Amino acid sequence: MDEIILHHFDSSPFAEKVRLAFGLKGLEWRSVEIPMVMPKPALTALTGGYRKTPVLQIGADIYCDTQCIASELERRFPLPTLFPEHSEALAMAFSQWSDNAFFQPGAGLSMGTNDALPEDILQDRREFFNFLDFATLEQQLPHLYSQFRAHLQLVDGLLDDGRSFVLGTVPGWMDILAYFPVWMGRANIARTPELLRALPALTDWEQRMQGIGHGSKLALTADDALTIARDSQSEVEPLISADAWPSLAENASVVVTPQDYGAVPVQGTLLRLTHGEVAIRREDKLVGEVVVHFPRVGYQVEAV
């Protein structure tokens, strides 16, 4: 089986989700450190323009968005499961809360209260986080604190009956989804210890989550990752579901665009289209032909 390669940077909260998935499953993986700001030429060669962090690479298959990455890790490495108690559908719905309602006020607080952020990162995120009004960010901070604290309270409420993890006795993807904004807060948001002080169930669980670890990490250069993609072939079979929307044919020329932020369209020829996944073939002079995978939830697919 081809090696698991994660393109990420250490301070990315969304990459922390995948690193914890590696830890939960006890996986060995290769780490490619990518720039925190654009341009990201090696990553762009693989993804066709998708710029969010992280990106998972297995051979010539490129997986974008942590929803898609989690599903693919579960397919390839089913045990230990990310989805105990038959929770995959529930977890994917739960992700819409954690990735948006919980994460976004945390991102605003990270931008507005972390004085250690370099100016180039702030400028990049001003263009990237279109859900934030940076002109009034300082005035918004009390409201953002209220929202972030309210979501922390929800997490504490999930755990205050004495359970060890969100679904009971074993951790899963729902725990990772609830945890990553907490991890971001510890690293980037002023007054986070104060916010967490009155939430004992959450802070006890936080310690258990930290104990999961990140699996076994080995470094890899970006150039070596590109070589692996160029020397590999995707084994993904074409599949166009008859009832998938929109109605598109295999090999149609399409663009796939995130619907929230970082909305850079990626163009290619359609390989797979189901209610859960879209995959496109594309070529780049640095990597040859690759297949780029996205989830359906949160992504628009259009013919061009």
Image (cartoon, rainbow, N blue to C red):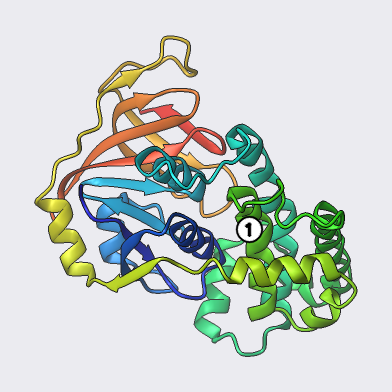
Q: Residue at x 83, y 57 (%)?
A: 162
Whether residue 114 can be seen here: yes
Residue count near mark 1 (Cα–Cα under 10 Å), binned few <14, some 14–19, many ≥20: few
Residue in the foreground of this view, choosing between 2 and 249: 2
Q: Residue 189, located in which quarter of the rendered image? A: bottom right
Q: Residue 247, located in which quarter of the rendered image? A: top left
Q: Is residue 274 above or below residue 100?
A: above
In percent of width and height, residue 127 lies at: 56, 65
Whether residue 287 can be seen here: no
Q: How many marks?
A: 1
In percent of width and height, residue 19 lies at: 46, 63
Q: Residue furthest top?
A: 242
Question: Is residue 271 left or right of 15 when viewed as pictured?
Answer: left
Q: Residue at x 66, y 89 (%)?
A: 115
Q: Is residue 286 above or below residue 234?
A: below
Q: Quadrant of the C terminus?
A: top left
- The kind of residue tagged 1 is Asn
Q: Residue furthest bottom?
A: 116
Q: Residue furthest left?
A: 231
Residue in the foreground of this view, choosing between 184 and 300: 184
Q: Residue at x 58, y 77 (%)?
A: 122
Question: Is residue 277 left or right of 210 when viewed as pictured?
Answer: left
Q: Residue at x 37, y 47 (%)?
A: 63
Question: Is residue 154 left or right of 110 when viewed as pictured?
Answer: right
Element type where label 1 sits in the image: loop
The residue that disc 1 covers is 130
In percent of width and height, residue 198 lies at: 90, 74
Residue in the foreground of this view, choosing between 145 and 135: 145
In percent of width and height, residue 29 lies at: 32, 62
